[in-house]
Image (cartoon, rainbow, N blue to C red):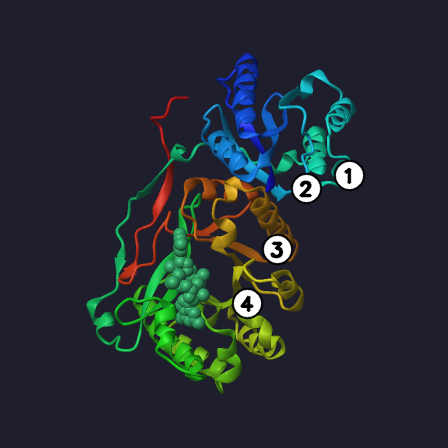
Amino acid sequence: MLTTIIYRSHLHEHVSYEVLKEMVVAANIKNGQAGVTGILLFNGTHFFQLLEGPEEGVAAIYQDICADNRHYNLVELLRDYAPSRRFGKTGMELFDLRDHRREEVLQAVFDRGTSRYQLIYGDRALQFFQTFVEDSEKENYFEIPPGDTWEFIADEQPVSLPAKALDSLAECRFAFQPIVDPFARQIVSLEALLRTPEGGSPQAWFAGLSGEDIYAADLHSKKVAFALAATLRLGAQTLSVNLLPMTLVKVPNAVEFFLQEIRANGLVPEQIVVEFTESEILSHLDEFTQAVKLLKGAGIRVAIEHFGAGFAGLLLLAQFQPDRIKINRALIQDVHKSGSRQAIVQAIIRCCTSLEIAVTAVGIETAEEWMWLESAGITHFQGYLFAPPSLSGIPAVAWPEKREDLPS
Ligand code: C2E
C-alpha cells in the first residue's frame, strides 16, 4: 500500500551543507531502487522530509534514516496511507529554505505536486510542510542531548523492611516503587504495588478471587500496605496506593475502614494518594464521584492513573478534578521519537497546568524519554530507569549524573 512518512530531525554540527548535497544524490539512487519519492527541506539546522512509496520500501529507507548519525533528535510526525503519490515525479528533491522566501518555497513544493486532489483539499502532509516552513511549531522542538550524556548512579543504600514486618504476610505482599524528582534528587512519593505472597503481579492476585469478593479484598489488602509503609518511616514522602474505583462504591463503609487503617498505622490522611485507573471509573461515574468526595473531605488526595490509555480521560478532568494524573507508559514509550505522542503529552500537560493538576510520567525506561519529558515540563517520574519496584523495602534510586568524560 502506498505509504507516507514525514519526520523532522536536527543536522549534526559536524556535517557541512556540501556533504548534505552529496547525501541527497546518493539517497536518490537508493530511493529510486526502492520506488520511494519525496521532498526534503532544510532550514539551516533542521530537516523535514516526506517519503512516499510502497510500504516496505518506505519502512526500510526510514529505518536507515533513523540509524544515520549525521542527524539526531529524529521525530516521526506522520505515518499515513494515500491513494496516489503527492510528489511522484521528483525523486527526492532538496529545498534549502535559506535560499527562498517562505511563500516561494510553499508554492514551489505545491508546484511539484502530482496528486491534484490531496494537495487541494486540506491535506495533513501539506499542513506539516506549512508549519515547518513558517517555523510555527518551533517552541515544541525539544533538542535533547544523546542518552549517554547521563549516567544513572545509585549512591545510597536501599531501605529494607524489617524481617518481622514480612513474617505475617499470608494473603498478600506489596512492592514499593519510588516516584522521584530527579533534578531535586528527591523521592517525592512511594507507590505500594500489590503482589501475591510469591511476589506475583496484581493481576495474578486478583485472579484468585471471584465476583464481588475482589472489592473487599482490594480494600483489606491496604491494611498490609499501610502497616509495611509505617515501618519504612516515610517522613515527608507521600504514599500512593491503588484501589479499584468500585471498591469505594461496593464495600459498605469503605472510606471509614480506609481512614481507620491509615490512623492505626501512625500515618495521616494528607500523606496518602489513592490512584484509580481511568478506564474503570467511567462505568459508575456518579457513585464514584460521591465516594471521592468522602476521601477528599477526609484529606486524602486522588490520582487518575493510566491516563491517556482510555477514551474519555479528558472528560474525566471536567467531571471530577483529581490532584494528580499519571500518564500511561503507552504514551511515554519512545516519546522523544514520536510527534503524535509528543503532541498528546503536551496537550495533557497544558490542560493539567491550567487546572493545577500535578502530572507524573510512569514507565520511564530510557534517558531520552526522561529528558524529553523534563523538557516538556514534567518533574515527577516513576520507572525502571530510576528504580524498579522492590518487595523488600525502598530500592536505591539511580540518580542522573552528567558524564564528564564525553568529548565536547
Ligand atoms: P500502576 O499503578 O500504574 O503501577 C505502575 C506499574 O508499572 C507497576 O506494575 C510497575 O511495576 C510498572 N512499572 C513501573 N516502572 C516501569 C517501567 O519502567 N517499565 C514498565 N514496563 N513497567 C513499569 P504492576 O505492579 O504490575 O501493577 C500494574 C497495575 O496494577 C498498577 O499500575 C495498578 O493499576 C494495579 N495495582 C497495583 N496494586 C494494586 C492494588 O493494590 N489494588 C488495585 N486495585 N490495583 C493495583
Q: What element carries label 4?
A: helix
Picture coordinates of residue 351, whole percent (x, y): 64, 54
Q: Which amino acid does label 3 sit on?
A: Cys
Answer with left or right where residue 180 lies relative to residue 344.
left
Q: How far apart are marks 3 and 2 (CA)?
A: 39 Å
Q: What residue type is labelled 4?
A: Ser
Answer with left or right where residue 353 lies relative to residue 113.
left
Q: Mark 3 points at which residue?
A: 352
Q: Distance between the residues labelled 4 and 1?
A: 40 Å
Total number of numbered discs in the rendering:
4
Q: Is mark 2 on a helix, strand or loop?
A: loop
Answer with left or right where residue 42 lies relative to residue 216.
right
Query: Where 91 sits versus 84, above or below?
Result: above
Label at residue 83: 2
Rate crowding at label 2 as few (under 14), some (14 to 19) or many (20 or more) other CA atoms within 10 Å: few
Rate crowding at label 4 as few (under 14), some (14 to 19) or many (20 or more) other CA atoms within 10 Å: some
